[in-house]
Amino acid sequence: MLNWLDRLPWTWLLLLVAWMAIAPITPEPHLVEKLRLLFQGALVRPLDMFDLAMHAAPLLLVMLKLWRKWRARST
């Protein structure tokens, strides 16, 4: 089901993670801002939730790809 993720090159995925984690650089990266709002309980606007999902998605893909790779080696 997730074979497309296994075929995705690490280089492009890590570049996407780095780009989305720091964009925009000023005044504060969106991912940092949205996580701060989430932990403060102030993440209530739909646009903020969408921003968090968009900026965190590549990081979640890396974590899923690492998990699949670890699971494949352990079996």
Image (cartoon, grey):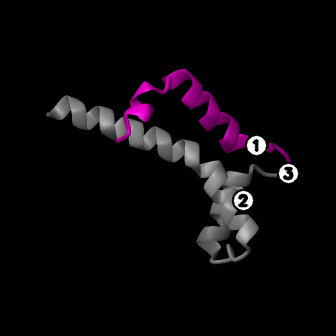
Label whose residue precedes the other's in the sequence (3 or 2) = 3
Q: Residues within 10 Å of mark 1 (few under 14, many from 20)?
A: some
Judged by depth in the image, the label closer to the viewer, 2 or 1, is 1
Tell me, yes or no, whether the highlighted magenta stretch contains residue 9: yes
Tell me, yes or no, whether the highlighted magenta stretch contains residue 5: yes
The residue pinned by badge 1 equals 23
* Image-quadrant location for residue 16: top right
* Image-quadrant location for residue 11: top right
Quadrant, the N terminus: top left
**Element under disc 1:** loop
The residue pinned by badge 2 equals 33
Q: Residue at x 57, y 42 (%)?
A: 58
The residue pinned by badge 3 equals 27
Contact flag, marks 2 and 1 (Cβ < 8 Å): no
Q: Which segment did they paint magenta?
A: 1-27
**Element under disc 2:** helix
Q: Residue type at mark 3?
A: Pro
Quadrant, the C terminus: top left
Q: Residue at x 63, y 61 (%)?
A: 35
Q: Residue at x 62, y 69 (%)?
A: 38
In the figure, is residue 44 to the left or right of 1? right
Q: Residue type at mark 1?
A: Ala
**Element under disc 3:** loop
Judged by depth in the image, the label closer to the viewer, 1 or 3, is 1
Residue 34 image position (x, y, % from top left)? 68, 61
> Spatial distance from mark 2 to mark 1, Cα to Cα?
11 Å
Q: Residue type at mark 2?
A: Glu
> Spatial distance from mark 3 to mark 2, Cα to Cα?
10 Å
In the figure, is residue 16 to the left or right of 26? left
